[in-house]
Amino acid sequence: MNNARLRWRKFVSNFMLAMTGVCAFVSVLVLFFILGYLVFNGGTSINWDFFTKLPKPVGETGGGMANAIVGSGKILLLASLMGVPIGFLGGIYLAEFSGKGMASVVRYAADLLNGVPSIVIGIFAYGLVVLPFKHFSAYAGSFALGMMMIPITLRSTEEFLKSVPRMLREGAMALGASKWKTIATVIVPAAYRGIMTAILLALARVAGETAPLLFTAFGNRFESHGWSQPTATLPVMIYTYAVSPYDDWHRQAWAAGLVLLGLVLIINILARTILSRGIAVPRS
Amino acid sequence: MATDTTASLKGAGPVTGSRSFFARLSDGDEIARLVTLVFAATVVLITAALVWELWTNSALPRQKFGLHFFVTSVWDPIMDEYGALPFIYGTMVTSAVALFIAVPMGIGAAIFLAELAPARVSDTLQFFIDLLAAVPSVIYGLLGVFIVVPLMRTVIYPALNKPFGYLPIFKGPSYGVGFLTAGIVLAIMVIPYIISVSREVLLSVPRDQREAALALGSTRWESTWKVVVPFAKTGIMGSIFLALARALGETMAVTMVIGNTPKIAASLFAPGYSIAAVIANEFTEATGDLYLQSLIALGLVLFLLTFILNGVARILIVVTTQKGSGVGA
Amino acid sequence: MKRFAGLAIGVLALCAIVLADNALLINGAGATFPYPIYSKWFDVYHTKNPNFQFNYQSVGSGAGIKQVTEGTVDFGATDGPMNDEQLKAYQDKHNGTGILHFPTVLGADVPTYNIPGVTGALNFTPEALAGIFLGKITKWNDPAIAGQNKGVNLPAEEIIVVHRSDGSGTTYIWTDYLSKVSDEWKTKVSKGTSVNWPKGLGGKGNEGVTGLVKQTPNAIGYVELIYAVQNNIPYGTVKNSSGNFVKADLASVTAAAAGAAKEMPDDFRVSITNAPGKTAYPISSFTWLLIPQKFQDAGKRDAIKGFLKWMLNDGQGSVEALSYAKLPKEVVEKEKKAINNIQ
């Protein structure tokens, strides 16, 4: 064997493999860099004021994002109430009741919906919910975000229900349970953890969405009461403050970014570690 | 005798439904089926409504400009003339830059995770990569504005413009914002998708492929690069398409760093515009039906692009993983 | 069980939010030009009248006009008055009832820049401004600029133009002025809230433009005076129609409105750019609230009328602190009468 050539090939091999290692670690490092940078810049601004006060007039320092935090919470809650039942029950239909034809139509529609860019969802929600009712509202924002939660919930519900062992099904039926009783009391509980994981991940994903809220929830200087008023939300506030020239607003944008990222990461970590021990978790 | 035992179980019968409608109804099965059917149908209805709304509300520019819409580069609300070209160009260029950076890094990282790292290290790192994919886009925008833009101005621009400034893609002044900045931010956003999917695809390549190569005397790298990766090639392509679809639709991070200028420029340092960014900026103020519908037409274009890419990506990935597991091979 | 408990707590919290204090919320959206004074006014007004919450979103004059026409907000705000076409579009959407313009303050568009080493006010001629924004004057040390600024060390760097990416009354004022002083601008670009800019970066809102200028060396943009002042960025003087280089301030902006004040049309739509007068600042403008003539909701109507009255009396007292000029007396009187037109 030609020794020099072999040594060169071995060198190339080690070098390239080391490079791949670099790629991997750099990619992971980005996550910690982002987190670290947010903590560094936003950490000091996270104080009691930030969580409890309303924004101050333009140019004045101080104030907080109480309305945006509550607003985001409200919109996400309603979005889940809108999107999860549709996805969940639709998934049950696909897994338990449907024939092949209908199933492929529904799956196809869900995949289509999943791929729609979020700004286009915003356009749709504006035309459907804002214009006819003639005002921006929290429920318009929830509608947009809820729609985005449907496909993931639907597909995951279907997958996890289908993966429940036949034994469980047949056992229940052998005991005389009707189909829906089997589903409600045996199959869904068995698939529960996987489905909850998927729902939480979907929630974390829409929690960070800004574009659909621009034309639906719009924005509010004050706390919004009820669901039919324009609402301030955390992502939109971050955007507005970040592109402004005011240093105080920049400081608050970092803090808000840290809160938002922290929330999203915590949901993800909880869902992926505790909830889904032993289950294969869906990618986004 | 058989009928006796089944009759003793109330309403029971064969497990699959050939019982009478009313028997099923009284069990609640039919109700359950109908209820869940309604919800499943709602999904189809929503999607159909979305597509229909996009199509009908973009009729005006279709009638007025026809296919010219895609090749005109004027965007003039006063003269009521609209062309999609600058936005399509911007969307394409930023995505291309993003892929140019993200694909080598992503595939490299995926190779490491699939081939080299021990299982626990691989899983842990993948966990962090999944978290990276969950970071909201407005946070990337925030970092883009305060980190990447100054970096572009102080480090990247001088590094590329001084030695290579004669090339059209590196010409011109430095704005800080622009195609390259947006491309870099997008690259960071799409790397996790390339890594996750490529890693899975590489893991599904059967062991014997690698071992055969090694047995023939190749180095680890050669067996990976010349045997395993080509085997998984279609799946990796699929991951790239997925990443591309994500990059195309990205709104907030792009509009915060691209410069919001509807002009086509050769230089990567020039400011530009993307489809999603122009919709976000101009939608709430588009007075006049043609203006508004032109924006919706842009939305339709974006939707079609991402739809096609996602569909193709999925096919490619499924084909590869099936090939690996020997199904349909 | 745990799930139910959690759900119950959630619902209760929800009720608390929903049923909490029932102030009347009035939504408005529009110009970023007067946003600093509007946000101050609405804040003060809410403290004085806790029953009313005026939620004003600074999204640009274009969006203000559009959304008030669609009826998704209760009032709009713009620095580029609605043109006849837009007024007709409003009427068509609202069964023939119209929309009224109410001037609130006087402000100015200033040319603001970020040139390393230059901290003072540069002198700009109309030709220089038009040339820069048309893309014909490309470097800071161009004779058209340097000639008026002897003694200032202008670098040989590319000028980075920053304009608005959204539909903007500030843009309307700026392009209105340029159309009056430059025939080339008038034919090539013309005036409007959203124009086809020959070159430059787009920032969202006055806030975005200020932000971009602040961060980008060698940039020039046009913003409302208070944005340059609040952010400590230099802004230049502009040569007015009498040949004097005038800096935007309370006196020069008030001087620009002097002529219009006496001849204010009934609908209050007027342009005061390039106004005559030795001390007049040439890029000044009124800014308007867009109030529908007819309200379905009597509560909202009365709240808005109440605010307008307060704005014309007490409100005017706080504008100068934010570098806006008060409305001329004649205009205030005329507006007070016009409030009665709101039904």
Image (tube, coloured by chain):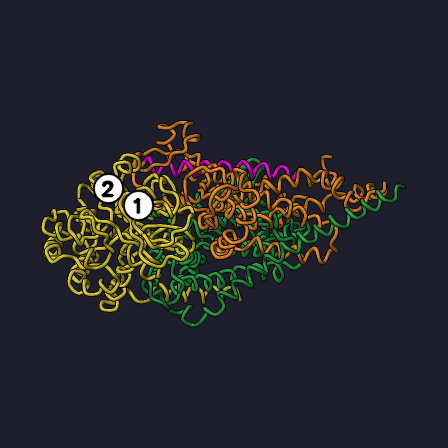
Chain colours: A green, B orange, C yellow
Residue at the bottom extreme of this rendering: A48
Task: Say above or below: B241 vs A196.
Answer: above
Seen from the viewer's position, the closer of residues C185 and C21 is C185
Please tell me whether residue C274 belongs to the stretch shown in magenta. no
- Secondary element under disc 1, as helix, strand or loop, is helix
Task: Say above or below: A103 vs A35.
Answer: above
Seen from the viewer's position, the closer of residues B170 and B104 is B170
Q: Amino acid at mark 2?
A: Val
Among numbered discs 1 and 2, the one appearing first in the sequence:
1
Quadrant of the snapshot with the N terminus of chain A: top right
Residue at the front extreme of this rendering: C151
Q: What residue range appears in magenta?
A: B290-319
- Secondary element under disc 2, as helix, strand or loop, is helix
Q: Which mark is residue C181?
A: 2
Chain ID, mark 1: C
Task: Provide residue B185's location: percent of width, then percent of height.
Answer: 53, 50
Residue drawn at x 59%, y 41% is: B17
Q: Which residue is mark 1?
A: C129
Q: Main secondary structure of the magenta part?
A: helix
For residue B214, side relative to residue B132 (left or right): right
Chain ID, mark 2: C
For residue A275, side relative to residue C273 (left or right): right
